[in-house]
Image: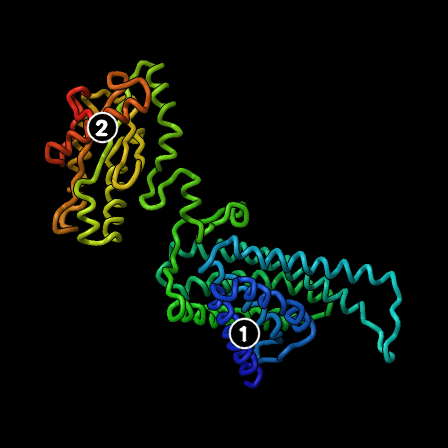
Amino acid sequence: MMGTFVLLAQALLYFSVMTLLFHSRRRLGIGVFVCALGVMHFLETYLAAVFFIELPFGLISPGSTVMFSGKLAMILLLYIREDAETVRQPIYGLLIGNMLMVALAFILRFYTPVPMNGYNPDLNLLDQLGALMVWGTALLFVDSLGLIMIYERLGRLFGSHPVMRASIALILVLTFDQLMFYQGLRIISGAPPSALLGGWLAKSGAAIVYSLLIAAYLRWFEPVVMSRDGTERLSDLFGKLTYRHRYEALLERSGIDALTGVADRSRFEAIAQSSVARALAEQRPLSVAIVDVDHFKDINDRYGHVTGDDVLRRIAETLRKSVRASDQVFRYGGEEFVVLCEGMSHEVAMAHAERLRRSVPAALENTLAITPTVSIGVATAPTDGANILELIHHADLHLYEAKRLGRNRVVGNRPADRLNPALS
């Protein structure tokens, strides 16, 4: 009973201090939290090797049960609220630092130290602990990869149950870790089999306790949506990282509009001209449709920018679902989208644009007091231009005419010279 109380007291103290530092990362910097996470690794390994508490189900060590399990829980919390880029910092730092410690201790063996008050340094102990620390840190690296992968995959089953999701991920990873770490522990310190079973049961219990504490922390101190879409491949976890805090910049570099999820203007400019050139070379038509949301400023002014952003997202999704598989949808800027349709004649493009125009209010019906609509201008190569700039120019003129005629319509058949010359 006393042993259980000691472990729970340590776990609560560990979690309280570490989450306090984590919560203060915006003010103190994440380095304080990472440093505290790593500085206890020596004590953690030492206790795991020599300090055991006897419980009815076996021998357990606070170093493994409280500190190592707590470290993995903190890594999971760090991943949930930050990203894999940040998670890798303590992992790499611990691995390199422990290997450096072993190398420095090995060099010291070439020199006999001066005794101090009859005390001689125990380099054998340092060797043993160093080997365990390197082994434990290597396992920690693998554990962290596995923890993130399992946590992500469990999101599909337990996205709305964070305690279940974190508990299962931690239990599975800690089971693997206990089996592997015990092998090194048995070789170095001769740990009995009861330490294997006892350590596994204790770590499983610690996984549940820490998962409950993480869920309580996220709910009361840093509310966050626990579930995340998608999974990471093993080769991507620490190379092609999540970069949650740089998500928009990542999408921008990949040619995806961060708000709507469709391709952005830079992507359009990168591929549109080559698409036109290919169509002309193959003597096939290519049509461009500029889609503009009617009275979008009024939507923002009346309902706010959050609602306006949601309208743009839903319109983008509607356009994407309504076009052919070979067509491409781009967010051109603001409330404007461009649809690029290769191999589509002007007459077919006009009918296609009309279907797009009707699909938008149908998808957003009853969402606002006034259902959003769109105006569309259409241009086709080679009739309206032999390059993308000419096509966009004519489609824009047609869009202007659609606006002038009252909006919520498709225009593409008026000669360019009869349109407003001010836009030329």
* Applied colour scheme: rainbow
> Quadrant location of the N terminus?
bottom right
Tell me if 121 is positioned left or right of 18 in this view: right
Q: Earlier in the sequence, mark 1 or mark 2?
A: 1
Task: State the residue in front, 130 or 39.
Answer: 39
Identified at 36% across, 23% down, the residue is 275
- Residue 12 x %, y %: 51, 77
Question: What residue did someone put label 1 on?
Answer: 14
- Residue 135 x %, y %: 67, 60
Residue furthest out toward the left: 406
Label 2: state its secondary structure: helix
Above or below residue 201? Residue 296 is above
Contact between marks 1 and 2 (CB within 8 A): the answer is no
Label 1: state its secondary structure: helix
Amino acid type, mark 2? Leu
Task: State the residue in front, 283 or 231.
Answer: 283
Question: What residue did someone put label 2 on?
Answer: 423
Can residue 325 be seen at all in this image of the molecule?
A: yes
Q: Residues within 10 Å of mark 2 (few under 14, many from 20)?
A: few
Gap in angstroms between the C-alphas marked 1 and 2:
66 Å
Residue furthest out toward the bottom: 2
Can residue 158 be seen at all in this image of the molecule?
A: no
Above or below residue 212? Residue 305 is above
Tell me if 278 is positioned left or right of 2 in this view: left
